[in-house]
Image (cartoon, grey):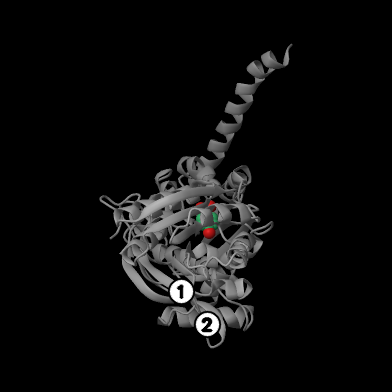
């Protein structure tokens, strides 16, 4: 028998059989009573715990730990168990799906909290829908993700939400021309699209755009093209970590800020815990983000204090740690609201319209889109008590994801 006819004969059977047994198992996993019979709320986490983004993964986990240290490990009569799985970072959709399936089928997770990267979140959408399992997105920031399954709710941000706020700010603040540099995958393309929409709607002009691989470390050619276009500003997004540090250091070496070209970045590029590593390169850099460690609200003061108590005086939490904390806050609040009913549809109904007083400030889950509505801060790299920080000097209240909200980008 030729390979082709073997594949035709056995391939579809193998595929159908595998899918069926998975769905049967998922059905069984979901067939229990609505109120947890075992007295447990099981939260499965899927995070990058190894590889190039392991430090980011640790931030999410630390935020989860801070939440439980401050708010306990019970909700009503249920004890809370978290089970961690490692999806190893971007470009691992298959692994992310397998880890999620394992958490649902084997560990009987009631809710999933995770997905740092868009491809990983996208890869589990159909699984969540088939299994009827709620997932709180901890970071992945492409607008469309939440539309891929009715069981997604997002506690992070969308890149259009941040980039459009920054684009509108730039146009209002005497920046006439800009060049964009983004990571060449969905959240980067979303960031580019929505920075440009808001900036040009405010009268700005784009003089060029380039996209770099997600794990680019050599930003020299991209920055050279930007400088050659002689813009007033360069806008950039990348998914953080060492790659963001490489971008910032290269920009400093080329004297971008000193030459009078303003650097405008999303919060990912200047994550708070990497600011000491970025060092002088952050001087004067304008960023937009939904959290910075210096926020003075009572929730953030308690959060930072506990973070340092648990992880050391020098440890700095970033927006990812806050997403871990807020993901837990949202799950606890929803379970309290349902009176311990862990049925997926009951939990999803509880998430919709929910408000949280978070270390980032007040936020709401949009009942229509299940996406987060929150304040976006405009910050500048400045020294505070001798240490570099992202310091807020302006903000826009209650920003929705503009890619879903009806009407034009924010003014
Ligand atoms: C994403 O893949 O959606 C992503 C990852 C890291 C970020 C932002 C977005 O900092």
- The percent position of residue 350, horizontal first and vertical second, equals 35, 59
Identify the image quadrant of residue 166: bottom left
Residue 126 versus residue 274: which sits nearer the camera?
Answer: 274
Residue 80 visible somewhere in the drawing: no
Residue 54 versus residue 181: which sits nearer the camera?
Answer: 181
Q: Quadrant of the C terminus?
A: bottom left
- The percent position of residue 63, horizontal first and vertical second, equals 54, 70
State left or right for residue 310 relative to residue 39. Answer: right
Residue located beneath label 1 in the image: 380
Residue 385 versus residue 60: which sits nearer the camera?
Answer: 385
Q: Secondary structure at mark 2?
A: strand
Disc 2: CA contacts within 10 A as few (<14), some (14-19) or many (>=20)? some
CA–CA distance in space, label 2 to label 1: 10 Å
> Which residue of the protein is positioned furthest toward the right in this rendering?
1
- The percent position of residue 74, horizontal first and vertical second, equals 50, 70
Q: In the rendered structure, find residue 322 and report the number of the disc placed on it.
A: none
State left or right for residue 135 relative to residue 16. Answer: left
Residue 294 visible somewhere in the drawing: yes
Residue located beneath label 2 in the image: 383
> Which residue of the protein is positioned furthest toward the left in this rendering?
407
Q: Is residue 129 above or below residue 363?
A: above
> Which residue of the protein is positioned furthest toward the top in this rendering?
1
Disc 1: CA contacts within 10 A as few (<14), some (14-19) or many (>=20)? many
Q: Secondary structure at mark 1?
A: strand
Residue at figure coordinates x 34%, y 67% from the top left: 173
Residue at figure coordinates x 57%, y 61% from the top left: 240
**Contact, CB < 8 Å: mark 2 with mark 1?**
no
Residue at figure coordinates x 45%, y 58% from the top left: 231
- The percent position of residue 359, horizontal first and vertical second, equals 44, 74
Q: Quadrant of the N terminus?
A: top right
Q: Is mark 2 within 8 Å of ligand 1?
A: no
């Amino acid at each position: 028998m030729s390979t082709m006819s073997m594949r035709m004969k056995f391939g579809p059977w193998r595929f159908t059989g595998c899918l069926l047994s998975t769905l049967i198992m998922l059905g069984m996993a979901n067939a229990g009573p609505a109120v947890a019979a075992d007295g447990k709320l099981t939260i499965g986490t899927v995070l990058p715990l190894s590889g190039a983004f392991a430090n980011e993964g640790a931030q999410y986990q630390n935020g989860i730990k801070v939440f439980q240290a401050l708010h306990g490990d019970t909700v009503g009569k249920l004890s809370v168990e978290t089970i961690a799985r490692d999806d190893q970072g971007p470009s691992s959709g298959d692994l992310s799906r397998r880890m999620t399936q394992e958490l649902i089928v084997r560990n009987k997770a009631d809710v999933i909290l995770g997905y740092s990267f868009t491809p990983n979140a996208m890869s589990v959408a159909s699984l969540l829908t088939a299994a009827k399992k709620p997932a709180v997105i901890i970071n992945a920031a492409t607008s469309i993700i939440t539309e891929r399954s009715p069981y997604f709710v997002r506690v992070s941000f969308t890149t259009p939400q941040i980039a459009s706020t920054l684009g509108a700010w730039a146009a209002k603040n005497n920046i006439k021309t800009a060049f964009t540099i983004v990571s060449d995958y969905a959240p980067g393309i979303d960031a580019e699209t929505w920075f440009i929409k808001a900036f040009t709607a405010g009268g700005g002009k784009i003089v060029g755009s380039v996209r770099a691989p997600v794990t680019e470390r050599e930003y020299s050619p991209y920055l050279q093209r930007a400088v050659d276009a002689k813009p007033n500003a360069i806008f950039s997004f990348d998914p953080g970590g060492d790659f963001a540090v490489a971008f910032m250091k290269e920009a400093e070496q080329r004297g971008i800020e000193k030459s009078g070209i303003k650097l405008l970045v999303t919060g990912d590029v200047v994550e708070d815990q990497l600011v000491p590593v970025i060092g002088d390169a952050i001087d004067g850099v304008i960023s937009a983000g939904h959290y910075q460690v210096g926020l003075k609200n009572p929730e953030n003061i308690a959060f930072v204090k506990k973070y340092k108590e648990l992880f050391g005086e020098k440890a700095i939490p970033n927006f990812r740690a806050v997403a871990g904390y807020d993901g837990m806050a949202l799950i606890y609040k929803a379970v309290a609201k349902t009176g311990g009913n862990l049925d997926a549809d009951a939990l999803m109904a509880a998430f919709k319209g929910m408000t949280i007083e978070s270390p980032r400030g007040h936020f709401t889950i949009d009942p229509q889109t299940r996406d987060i509505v929150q304040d976006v801060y405009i910050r500048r790299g400045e020294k505070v008590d001798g240490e570099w920080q992202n310091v807020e000097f302006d903000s826009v209240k209650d920003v929705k994801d503009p890619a879903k909200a009806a009407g034009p980008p924010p003014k």
